[in-house]
Amino acid sequence: MTLISPPIDAFADAAEKKYAATRNLGELMWIQYPGHFNQALSKAIVTPATVGSRFFDHRISSYEPGAHVEAHVHAVQEQIYHVLSGQGLLIVDGERRLVRADDVTFIPPGVAHEFHCTGNDPLVFLVITSPPTDEEPQPR
């Protein structure tokens, strides 16, 4: 049996046309975004490009040992990091925090942060960002 997987943007009009979209993570490709290094990979699940979302960017990330995202600050975006497995070092405004499975961190705008996989196994975590771009959302 062959399963046909729709392209990444198959449901890009879901928000506009007001229908619910369901994806399987196996349909999505791993991407290394700018500022991410050494196999710091993510899958874009709910984003403006994938479902037309205005308020959310939801990704799953998997960082191999030694992988990291460089220090950065968001102007208006809020982020949540929800660790599913592995462990890593989350540096928030210079404070080093060891995080592992079931740890959840909220990062408000204006707070410098970087994330490193310091364990022996991949660090797998969810990233929820609102709004999806680092500027105020525009009204419809």
Image: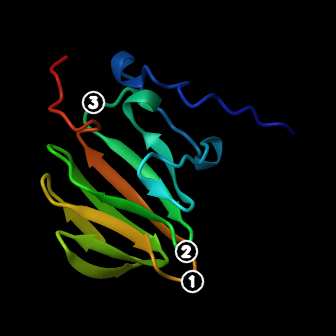
The C terminus: image quadrant: top left
One can see residue 28 in this view: yes
Say which amino acid is labelled 3.
Arg
Q: Which residue is mark 1?
A: 120
Above or below 105: residue 109: above
Above or below 65: residue 10: above
Which of the numbered marks, if any, corresponds to residue 65?
2
Say which amino acid is labelled 1.
Asn
Label 2 to label 3: alpha-carbon separation? 33 Å
Q: Nearer the viewer, residue 40 or 137?
A: 40
SS for tag 3? loop
Mark 2 or mark 1, which has the lower sequence index? 2
Above or below 114: residue 13: above
Give the left or right position of residue 96, taking residue 69 as reference: left
| Residue 6: x %, y % from top left | 64, 29
Label 1 to label 3: alpha-carbon separation? 37 Å
Mark 2 or mark 3, which is nearer to you? Answer: 2
Give the left or right position of residue 104, taking residue 121 as reference: left
Which of the numbered marks, if any, corresponds to residue 54?
3
Cβ atoms at labels 2 and 1 below 8 Å apart = yes
| Residue 51: x %, y % from top left | 43, 29
Mark 1 or mark 3, which is nearer to you? Answer: 1
Q: Nearer the viewer, residue 61 or 67?
A: 67
